[in-house]
Amino acid sequence: MAKIALIHTTPVTVESLKNLIKAGAPDLKIINIVDDSILPELIDNEADLSLVEKRVKYYINTAVKQGADLVMSACSSIGEIFEEENRKYEIPIMRIDSAMAEKAVAKARKIGVAATLATTLKPSTKLLKNKAAEINKDIVIRKVLADKAYQKLMAGDQKAHDQLLAEKLKELAAEVEIVVLAQASMARAVKVLPAELKDKFLTSPELGIEKALKILEKKLN
């Protein structure tokens, strides 16, 4: 049976990603590895990836040894490590936000990046610029941080998280052509936005999982 491994930095993304995978590939076995100490460490140390790099690489290697056919990061803050490790393994080592970035630069020139964690703004912006460079396209990026929303999420108040974030997203949407949500945990907030605005937002879970499942289908058939 085919296996996909997801490496999480918060338990918040476990259930939502599992549901997306099961909707598209009911028989696919899921390996979840969760380390909720990574994000606090990055937050306290200006997103210095060198402090968590060894640990993340260990988790990737563990997933490979467990027989994963594809390993994916569920967190944008550590996505760059997955890009580096992808060169070392025979199976795909993916970051969840790659497909979202590709679609954003294909559809728009003026792009908004929204995050609830400062640690994801830089890697998400860098990813967008890299994807734009691959297709020789100039883009303009506008960034917004909704850190109070993240505090509410960590306190278990998901409704307040969604409402605070939605307000920031509406403001950003008025200034750009399209908005990418830098963290998988933010996708839930799109549901509370007005229907006429929802098409302006791209989220990494749906697009990332869709791309992963297509790669697995091609690889295993």
Image: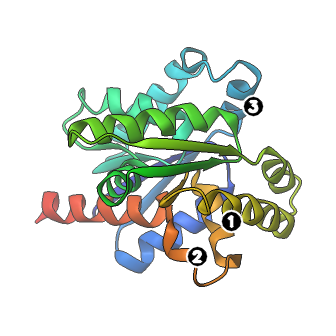
Given residues 61 and 106, the one toward you in this image is 106
Residue labelled with disc 1: 170
Given residues 109 and 115, the one toward you in this image is 109
Percent across and percent down for residue 148 are 84, 48
Q: Quick check: can you spot residue 121?
A: yes
Q: Quadrant of residue 172?
A: bottom right
Given residues 9 and 130, the one toward you in this image is 130
Label 1 CA crowd tier, 10 Å (few <14, some 14–19, many 20+): some
Position of 110 relative to 170 (above/below):
above
- Disc 3 is placed on an element classified as helix
Report the colour scheme: rainbow
For discs 3 and 2, the disc positioned in front in the rendered view: 2
| Amino acid on which the number 2 mark rests in the picture | Leu
Percent across and percent down for residue 221 are 10, 66
> In 3D space, how far apart are the residues under numbered discs 3 and 2 (Cα atoms)?
32 Å
- Would residue 100 appear left or right of 148 to someone viewing this image? left
Any mark on residue 197, and which? 2
Residue labelled with disc 3: 40
The N terminus - image quarter: bottom left
| Amino acid on which the number 1 mark rests in the picture | Lys
- Disc 1 is placed on an element classified as helix
Q: Residue placed farthest to the top in the image?
A: 50
Residue in the image at 62% along x and 50% along y: 114
> In 3D space, how far apart are the residues under numbered discs 2 and 1 (Cα atoms)?
8 Å
Given residues 86 and 192, the one toward you in this image is 192
Label 2 CA crowd tier, 10 Å (few <14, some 14–19, many 20+): some
> In 3D space, how far apart are the residues under numbered discs 3 and 1 (Cα atoms)?
28 Å
Tag 2 and tag 1, C-beta contact below 8 Å: yes
Chain-order first, disc 2 or disc 1: 1
Percent across and percent down for residue 67 are 31, 47
For discs 3 and 1, the disc positioned in front in the rendered view: 1
